[in-house]
Image: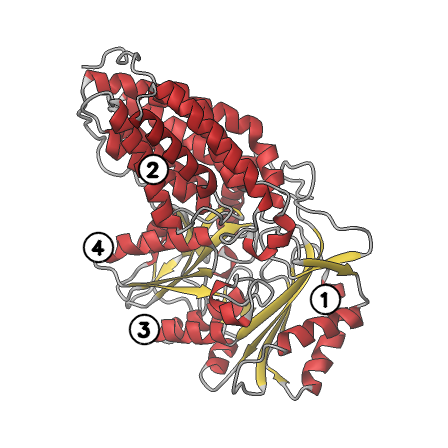
Amino acid sequence: MTKIFNDPSEFAEEALAGFCDVHSDLVRQVQGGAVRRYRPTQPKVAVLTGGGSGHYPAFAGLIGSGFADGAVVGNIFTSPSAQQAYSVAKAAESGAGVIFTYGNYAGDVMNFGMASERLAAEGIAVENVLVTDDIASAPPSESAKRRGIAGDFTVFKVMGAAAENGADLAEVVRLGRKANDLTRTIGSAFAGCTFPGAEAPLFTLPEGQMGLGLGIHGEPGLHDTDLPSAKDLGQELVARVLSETPPNAGKRIAVILNGLGSTKHEELFVLWGTVAPLLRAAGYTLVMPEVGELVTSLDMAGVSLTVTWLDEELEPLWAAPAETPAYRRGAVSAQAGTSAQEEAADAGAAAEAFVASDASRGYAAACVEAIGAARALLHGAEEQLGRMDAIAGDGDHGRGMVRGVDAAAAAAADALGRGAGAGDVLAAAGDAWADKAGGTSGVLWGAGLRAFGETVGNSSAPETAVLAAGVTAFADRIVQLGKAEIGDKTMVDALLPFASTFSRAVADGTAPGLAWQDAARDAAAAAEATADLLPLKGRARPLAEKSLGTADPGATSLAMVFAVMGPHFTTTTSTAPAGAK
């Protein structure tokens, strides 16, 4: 159990600050994460790893010569926001372009993708390389849907070495994707991990059992089995990885036997005593194997085996020198480049001058009250939502929603105090939610609120038809980003029934307040009905069977939030804030 913390919600930020202070000779903290202390004297491709916290030494621990140029660091097990990714890229970019590389998770794909669009619009060359090494998370026929777990390390290492050698953007991308295509991982969990401040682990296993096919975000294994001896476990892991040997693969391999957080090195060495002979007996030469903690999951007890089939291109990159805070191989050249100055916090543009009518400012006050009601509700439901999410996911949904709504409430109140109308208040709330919550739900809620605000505007309090259009815009934006449909067991299962019922009811002449109540009831019923569905999207998809009988946490939280927001969004009687003109 994680014992050392202050405010659990600040754990990731405090850990990053401490890490950067300890290793200030190699890294410096920037908004959204960390980058190398020294900037290159000549343009080079910036390889930027990223994802949630809780995986040390991934991701920030791998910043340094021969490896990553920077890391984008989200909250525990939560995708960093698009703003974080953009900020780190701007700090690390030196004129040859940037590559975001990360595990294949929906929130990461959305947020790094949005950051890439913004960078590209500014003329910065940018690419994304996804890691999909987890053979347990999807069959070979759907390999593009697989998660990225400990294979992250191999792919990042290959790309970092290639960039250090001066390869251009296209070449680093090609080599990274090639390494990913030749990498396979299988893992097993013996006990779940515990978030800072939580009273129980995300999952438990019966005595004498293990979960085969774990994820690195605190997810349980895909199925439980009797805990075997080290010899039997080694045979199981090797057999499963070699069963997916790539076509025409060679006989030289990089091997990682990875501890997940509380499995001791001595245990790993015992397991290696079975794994290595089996691989050699299969005709393989093991090239600079690694045994230790390289991609962890807080304090999870577990182990994973990764194999990357090498060739004449990949082997020199795998073997190349590297020097990072957490990993050293060989002797690197003296740090070349200039020591970057510490950056002051980006205050952004000058304070925006809002233009809005008194009526819109009056409705903006109601919007602030709506977000405040959601904030109170989510703080009370945080633990419940986390437990639901831990059944087949990473258990962070409650905490992510709290972080998002806290940031949204503060940003909305600030915008209102500076004279913003309803549209700008909702947009500010959405941007803050996405930035601070991160993850899939963060980016979706943020985008939805912004779309709602853009529809409502700042010229007047919205008439009923405009309010209905705002709800529809909220839903459309989320569907567009997340690509989910009804039946996929996501927040969309509650959102679309809500939007449909509300629009239909007000079109039939029902008063907005009553129509919202009817829609909220339909959303709550739809959320409850997701207990009977198998997830087809998101992190719960690999653990679909485990989620049967439990409602989707995203659908549940959306129905809860919309229910308490209704009385505020449907009011037309709020007055403008004092001093508004």
Residue at horizontal 52 percent and vertical 43 percent from the top? 12
Mark earlier in primary sequence (1, 2)? 1
The N terminus sits in image quarter? top right
Residue 352 position within the rendered picture, expressed as x and y whole percent measured from the top left = 21, 30
Say if mark 1 contacts mark 2, CB within 8 Å.
no
Mark earlier in primary sequence (4, 3)? 4
Three-letter amino acid code at disc 4? Answer: Glu
Pick whichever, 259 or 112, lies toward us.
112
Q: Residues within 10 Å of mark 2 (few under 14, many from 20)?
A: many
Residue 62 position within the rendered picture, expressed as x and y whole percent measured from the top left = 50, 61
Task: Residue under label 3, please give it.
Answer: 170
The C terminus sits in image quarter? top left
> Helix, strand, or loop for circle 3?
helix
Say if mark 2 contacts mark 3, CB within 8 Å.
no
Task: Residue under label 2, please give it.
Answer: 474
The answer to which image quadrant residue 123 occupies is: bottom left
Disc 4 and disc 1: Cα gap in Å?
47 Å
Task: Residue under label 4, please give it.
Answer: 122
Is 111 drawn above or below residue 304 in the view shown?
Answer: above
